[in-house]
Amino acid sequence: MSRHARIRPFPLLNRAPAALLNVAEPRTVAVAQCLSSSSRHQQRQRKSPRAPPSCRHYSASQQSSSRPPPPPPSRWLSDLTARLGKCIMFGCGPAQVARAAGVLRALATEWRALVAGSEGFLTGGRRGLEGQQVVWGEQDSFQHVNNANYVRYAESSRVNWITHFAGVDRAHGEEWRELMTPKGVGLIMKSIKAEYKFPMTYPDRISVYHKLRALPDASDTSLILDCVVLSHRHRRAAATTEEEVVIYDYKEAKKTTMPPFVLDVFRDTWRLQEEEVRRARSRVWDLIREVEGLEKETWNREDAVEDLGSAGKKS
Protein backbone atom coordinates (compact mmCIF):
# COMPACT_ATOMS: atom_id res chain seq x y z
CA MET A 1 0.00 0.00 0.00
CA SER A 2 1.26 3.52 -0.80
CA ARG A 3 2.16 5.92 1.99
CA HIS A 4 -0.91 7.99 1.14
CA ALA A 5 -4.13 6.01 0.99
CA ARG A 6 -7.48 7.47 -0.07
CA ILE A 7 -10.55 5.37 0.46
CA ARG A 8 -13.96 6.52 -0.71
CA PRO A 9 -16.83 6.13 -0.06
CA PHE A 10 -18.11 3.73 2.60
CA PRO A 11 -20.57 4.10 5.50
CA LEU A 12 -19.47 4.46 9.08
CA LEU A 13 -19.69 1.29 11.12
CA ASN A 14 -22.41 1.43 13.74
CA ARG A 15 -20.04 0.14 16.40
CA ALA A 16 -16.37 -0.49 17.00
CA PRO A 17 -15.05 -3.95 16.01
CA ALA A 18 -14.78 -6.34 18.92
CA ALA A 19 -11.02 -6.62 18.41
CA LEU A 20 -10.62 -2.92 19.08
CA LEU A 21 -12.13 -2.63 22.55
CA ASN A 22 -10.23 -0.34 24.89
CA VAL A 23 -7.52 -1.93 27.02
CA ALA A 24 -6.25 -0.13 30.10
CA GLU A 25 -2.61 0.93 29.85
CA PRO A 26 -0.27 0.11 32.76
CA ARG A 27 1.51 3.35 33.55
CA THR A 28 4.97 3.56 34.99
CA VAL A 29 7.15 6.37 36.18
CA ALA A 30 10.15 4.29 37.17
CA VAL A 31 12.70 6.87 36.06
CA ALA A 32 11.10 9.63 38.14
CA GLN A 33 10.72 7.37 41.17
CA CYS A 34 14.37 6.43 40.93
CA LEU A 35 15.38 10.07 40.91
CA SER A 36 13.10 11.29 43.67
CA SER A 37 12.90 8.23 45.48
CA SER A 38 -17.21 19.75 -0.19
CA SER A 39 -18.32 23.43 -0.83
CA ARG A 40 -16.84 26.73 0.38
CA HIS A 41 -17.19 25.36 3.87
CA GLN A 42 -15.02 22.39 2.82
CA GLN A 43 -12.35 24.73 1.47
CA ARG A 44 -12.56 26.76 4.67
CA GLN A 45 -12.05 23.61 6.75
CA ARG A 46 -9.15 22.33 4.65
CA LYS A 47 -7.37 25.69 4.84
CA SER A 48 -7.60 26.38 8.56
CA PRO A 49 -4.88 28.82 9.70
CA ARG A 50 -1.63 27.32 10.92
CA ALA A 51 -0.24 28.10 14.35
CA PRO A 52 2.65 30.56 14.53
CA PRO A 53 6.12 29.04 14.08
CA SER A 54 7.77 27.51 17.13
CA CYS A 55 10.34 29.44 19.11
CA ARG A 56 12.76 28.45 21.84
CA HIS A 57 11.46 30.79 24.55
CA TYR A 58 7.85 31.57 25.43
CA SER A 59 6.58 33.62 28.33
CA ALA A 60 3.14 33.06 29.83
CA SER A 61 2.63 36.82 29.70
CA GLN A 62 2.61 36.58 25.90
CA GLN A 63 -0.57 34.49 25.92
CA SER A 64 -3.78 36.26 24.90
CA SER A 65 -7.39 35.13 24.86
CA SER A 66 -7.51 35.25 21.05
CA ARG A 67 -4.17 33.69 20.23
CA PRO A 68 -2.73 30.46 21.66
CA PRO A 69 0.94 30.06 22.58
CA PRO A 70 3.17 28.94 19.71
CA PRO A 71 3.50 25.19 19.20
CA PRO A 72 6.47 23.58 20.94
CA PRO A 73 9.32 22.04 18.89
CA SER A 74 8.23 18.85 17.13
CA ARG A 75 10.63 16.68 19.17
CA TRP A 76 10.13 18.43 22.49
CA LEU A 77 9.28 15.26 24.43
CA SER A 78 12.38 13.23 23.55
CA ASP A 79 14.49 16.40 23.60
CA LEU A 80 13.54 17.27 27.19
CA THR A 81 14.26 13.73 28.36
CA ALA A 82 17.74 13.82 26.79
CA ARG A 83 18.48 17.28 28.19
CA LEU A 84 17.48 16.21 31.69
CA GLY A 85 19.78 13.21 31.36
CA LYS A 86 22.67 15.51 30.49
CA CYS A 87 22.01 17.64 33.58
CA ILE A 88 21.91 14.57 35.82
CA MET A 89 25.06 13.04 34.33
CA PHE A 90 26.90 16.34 34.80
CA GLY A 91 25.95 16.45 38.47
CA CYS A 92 22.92 17.74 40.37
CA GLY A 93 22.31 18.64 43.98
CA PRO A 94 19.39 17.10 45.93
CA ALA A 95 17.05 20.01 45.14
CA GLN A 96 17.93 19.85 41.44
CA VAL A 97 17.40 16.08 41.39
CA ALA A 98 13.92 16.60 42.88
CA ARG A 99 13.08 19.19 40.21
CA ALA A 100 14.33 16.90 37.45
CA ALA A 101 12.24 14.06 38.89
CA GLY A 102 9.17 16.30 38.82
CA VAL A 103 9.67 17.08 35.14
CA LEU A 104 10.25 13.42 34.28
CA ARG A 105 7.14 12.42 36.20
CA ALA A 106 5.12 14.97 34.21
CA LEU A 107 6.54 13.67 30.93
CA ALA A 108 5.71 10.08 31.89
CA THR A 109 2.14 10.72 33.05
CA GLU A 110 0.99 13.69 30.94
CA TRP A 111 2.63 13.03 27.58
CA ARG A 112 -0.55 11.92 25.76
CA ALA A 113 -2.59 14.89 26.94
CA LEU A 114 0.24 17.27 26.07
CA VAL A 115 1.17 15.81 22.68
CA ALA A 116 -2.46 15.52 21.57
CA GLY A 117 -3.76 18.58 23.42
CA SER A 118 -1.17 20.93 21.93
CA GLU A 119 -2.79 20.16 18.55
CA GLY A 120 -6.35 20.57 19.84
CA PHE A 121 -7.27 16.92 20.45
CA LEU A 122 -9.34 16.24 23.57
CA THR A 123 -8.33 13.13 25.53
CA GLY A 124 -10.07 10.93 28.09
CA GLY A 125 -13.78 10.33 28.60
CA ARG A 126 -14.07 7.68 25.82
CA ARG A 127 -13.34 10.32 23.18
CA GLY A 128 -11.55 7.73 21.06
CA LEU A 129 -9.32 4.73 21.70
CA GLU A 130 -7.00 4.82 24.70
CA GLY A 131 -4.43 2.17 25.54
CA GLN A 132 -5.51 -0.06 22.64
CA GLN A 133 -3.10 -2.99 22.33
CA VAL A 134 -1.38 -3.58 18.99
CA VAL A 135 -1.61 -7.32 18.32
CA TRP A 136 0.97 -9.44 16.54
CA GLY A 137 -1.45 -10.41 13.75
CA GLU A 138 -1.78 -6.77 12.63
CA GLN A 139 1.75 -6.89 11.24
CA ASP A 140 2.46 -7.71 7.60
CA SER A 141 5.32 -9.52 5.86
CA PHE A 142 7.52 -6.45 6.37
CA GLN A 143 7.12 -6.95 10.14
CA HIS A 144 5.35 -3.67 10.84
CA VAL A 145 1.68 -2.83 11.35
CA ASN A 146 -0.09 -3.00 8.00
CA ASN A 147 -1.16 0.40 6.71
CA ALA A 148 -4.80 -0.66 6.41
CA ASN A 149 -5.02 -1.11 10.18
CA TYR A 150 -4.57 2.61 10.78
CA VAL A 151 -7.84 3.19 8.93
CA ARG A 152 -9.49 0.64 11.23
CA TYR A 153 -8.05 2.41 14.26
CA ALA A 154 -9.44 5.72 13.00
CA GLU A 155 -12.82 4.12 12.25
CA SER A 156 -13.21 2.74 15.77
CA SER A 157 -11.99 5.97 17.36
CA ARG A 158 -14.47 8.01 15.33
CA VAL A 159 -17.37 5.79 16.41
CA ASN A 160 -16.37 6.22 20.07
CA TRP A 161 -15.88 9.96 19.56
CA ILE A 162 -19.42 10.37 18.16
CA THR A 163 -21.23 8.07 20.58
CA HIS A 164 -19.50 9.53 23.66
CA PHE A 165 -21.54 12.70 23.04
CA ALA A 166 -24.62 10.70 24.09
CA GLY A 167 -23.26 10.93 27.62
CA VAL A 168 -22.38 14.60 27.26
CA ASP A 169 -25.77 15.61 25.84
CA ARG A 170 -28.05 13.22 27.72
CA ALA A 171 -31.21 14.99 26.54
CA HIS A 172 -30.41 13.79 23.00
CA GLY A 173 -28.57 10.61 23.90
CA GLU A 174 -30.68 8.38 21.66
CA GLU A 175 -30.29 10.74 18.70
CA TRP A 176 -26.50 10.70 19.12
CA ARG A 177 -26.46 6.91 19.11
CA GLU A 178 -28.69 6.81 16.02
CA LEU A 179 -26.15 8.90 14.11
CA MET A 180 -24.22 5.64 13.75
CA THR A 181 -27.22 3.77 12.31
CA PRO A 182 -29.18 4.08 9.01
CA LYS A 183 -32.45 4.94 10.78
CA GLY A 184 -32.72 8.69 10.21
CA VAL A 185 -30.04 11.35 10.04
CA GLY A 186 -26.65 9.68 10.12
CA LEU A 187 -23.02 10.08 9.13
CA ILE A 188 -21.44 8.60 6.01
CA MET A 189 -17.72 8.53 5.30
CA LYS A 190 -16.95 10.28 2.03
CA SER A 191 -13.16 10.09 2.06
CA ILE A 192 -10.20 9.39 4.29
CA LYS A 193 -6.54 10.16 3.67
CA ALA A 194 -3.85 8.65 5.88
CA GLU A 195 -0.30 9.89 6.38
CA TYR A 196 2.14 7.48 7.98
CA LYS A 197 4.88 8.86 10.22
CA PHE A 198 6.94 5.74 10.97
CA PRO A 199 6.49 1.92 10.80
CA MET A 200 4.94 0.85 14.09
CA THR A 201 5.62 -2.71 15.28
CA TYR A 202 4.41 -5.20 17.87
CA PRO A 203 4.44 -4.94 20.86
CA ASP A 204 2.92 -1.50 21.34
CA ARG A 205 -0.19 0.30 22.48
CA ILE A 206 -1.97 3.15 20.78
CA SER A 207 -4.29 6.01 21.64
CA VAL A 208 -6.39 7.50 18.85
CA TYR A 209 -8.19 10.86 19.00
CA HIS A 210 -10.38 12.99 16.72
CA LYS A 211 -11.03 16.71 16.50
CA LEU A 212 -13.05 19.18 14.45
CA ARG A 213 -10.94 21.04 11.92
CA ALA A 214 -13.16 24.13 11.82
CA LEU A 215 -15.99 25.76 13.76
CA PRO A 216 -19.24 24.16 12.46
CA ASP A 217 -21.91 26.23 10.74
CA ALA A 218 -25.67 25.64 10.55
CA SER A 219 -25.48 25.32 6.75
CA ASP A 220 -22.79 22.62 6.77
CA THR A 221 -23.66 19.30 5.16
CA SER A 222 -20.31 17.68 5.92
CA LEU A 223 -17.46 17.78 8.42
CA ILE A 224 -13.70 17.60 8.10
CA LEU A 225 -12.18 15.67 11.01
CA ASP A 226 -8.53 15.25 11.92
CA CYS A 227 -7.31 12.11 13.66
CA VAL A 228 -4.01 11.19 15.31
CA VAL A 229 -2.72 7.70 16.16
CA LEU A 230 -0.23 7.88 19.03
CA SER A 231 2.30 5.13 19.71
CA HIS A 232 2.86 4.59 23.44
CA ARG A 233 6.17 2.86 22.85
CA HIS A 234 7.61 5.79 20.90
CA ARG A 235 5.42 8.47 22.53
CA ARG A 236 4.70 10.23 19.26
CA ALA A 237 2.29 10.12 16.31
CA ALA A 238 2.52 6.98 14.18
CA ALA A 239 -0.07 8.24 11.68
CA THR A 240 -2.62 10.97 11.06
CA THR A 241 -5.78 10.96 8.99
CA GLU A 242 -7.98 13.55 7.35
CA GLU A 243 -11.60 12.46 7.10
CA GLU A 244 -14.62 14.00 5.38
CA VAL A 245 -17.94 12.86 6.83
CA VAL A 246 -21.25 13.68 5.14
CA ILE A 247 -24.46 14.32 7.10
CA TYR A 248 -27.05 12.12 5.40
CA ASP A 249 -30.81 11.73 5.78
CA TYR A 250 -31.52 8.05 5.18
CA LYS A 251 -35.29 8.57 5.03
CA GLU A 252 -35.04 11.26 2.34
CA ALA A 253 -32.01 9.60 0.70
CA LYS A 254 -30.04 12.84 0.42
CA LYS A 255 -27.55 15.04 2.20
CA THR A 256 -28.86 17.32 4.90
CA THR A 257 -27.66 20.02 7.24
CA MET A 258 -26.45 19.45 10.77
CA PRO A 259 -29.21 18.89 13.35
CA PRO A 260 -29.39 21.74 15.90
CA PHE A 261 -28.47 19.51 18.86
CA VAL A 262 -25.34 18.34 17.02
CA LEU A 263 -24.41 21.90 16.09
CA ASP A 264 -24.69 23.08 19.70
CA VAL A 265 -22.46 20.29 21.04
CA PHE A 266 -19.90 20.65 18.25
CA ARG A 267 -19.63 24.38 18.85
CA ASP A 268 -18.96 23.70 22.52
CA THR A 269 -16.44 21.03 21.51
CA TRP A 270 -14.66 23.56 19.30
CA ARG A 271 -14.40 25.91 22.28
CA LEU A 272 -12.95 23.11 24.42
CA GLN A 273 -10.45 22.28 21.68
CA GLU A 274 -9.17 25.85 21.62
CA GLU A 275 -8.92 25.92 25.42
CA GLU A 276 -6.98 22.65 25.39
CA VAL A 277 -4.49 24.04 22.86
CA ARG A 278 -3.75 26.94 25.21
CA ARG A 279 -3.54 24.74 28.30
CA ALA A 280 -1.35 22.04 26.78
CA ARG A 281 1.05 24.39 25.03
CA SER A 282 1.43 26.54 28.12
CA ARG A 283 2.21 23.43 30.15
CA VAL A 284 4.82 22.27 27.64
CA TRP A 285 6.53 25.67 27.63
CA ASP A 286 6.54 25.62 31.45
CA LEU A 287 8.37 22.27 31.35
CA ILE A 288 10.82 23.60 28.76
CA ARG A 289 11.60 26.61 30.95
CA GLU A 290 12.10 24.34 33.97
CA VAL A 291 14.64 22.26 32.05
CA GLU A 292 16.41 25.40 30.81
CA GLY A 293 16.66 26.56 34.41
CA LEU A 294 18.27 23.26 35.43
CA GLU A 295 20.74 23.54 32.55
CA LYS A 296 21.79 27.02 33.67
CA GLU A 297 22.34 25.71 37.19
CA THR A 298 24.41 22.68 36.09
CA TRP A 299 26.45 22.22 32.91
CA ASN A 300 25.51 25.55 31.28
CA ARG A 301 26.67 27.92 34.04
CA GLU A 302 29.87 29.93 33.65
CA ASP A 303 31.83 28.18 36.42
CA ALA A 304 30.50 24.72 35.61
CA VAL A 305 32.75 21.81 36.60
CA GLU A 306 31.53 18.29 35.94
CA ASP A 307 31.07 16.06 39.00
CA LEU A 308 33.23 13.02 38.22
CA GLY A 309 32.53 11.33 41.54
CA SER A 310 35.25 9.07 42.91
CA ALA A 311 36.98 8.99 39.51
CA GLY A 312 37.79 12.68 39.87
CA LYS A 313 39.41 12.39 43.30
CA LYS A 314 43.19 12.29 43.55
CA SER A 315 44.86 9.75 45.83
Image: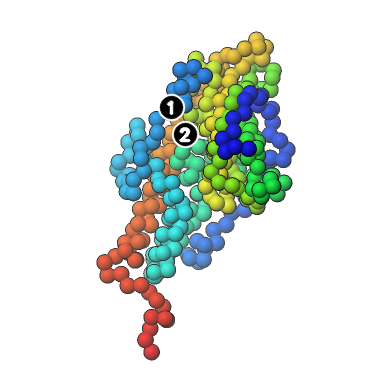
In what element is the residue under mark 2?
A: helix
Q: Position of residue 142 (x, y in %)?
A: 66, 48
Which of the 4 image quarters holds residue 175?
Answer: top right
Q: Amino acid at mark 1?
A: Lys
The quarter of the rendered structure image containing the C terminus is bottom left
Q: Is residue 183 above or below residue 227?
A: above
Q: Mark 2 sits on what residue? A: 273
Which of the 4 image quarters holds residue 228?
Answer: top right
The residue under the point 56% across, 31% down is: 193
Callout 1: few (<14), some (14-19), or many (20+) C-alpha neighbours within 10 Å? few
Residue lying at the far top in this picture: please name it: 252
Q: Amino acid at mark 2?
A: Gln
Pair 1/2: label in front = 1
Q: Position of residue 144 (x, y in %)?
A: 64, 48
Residue lying at the far bottom in this picture: please name it: 315
Q: Nearer the viewer, residue 51 or 166?
A: 51
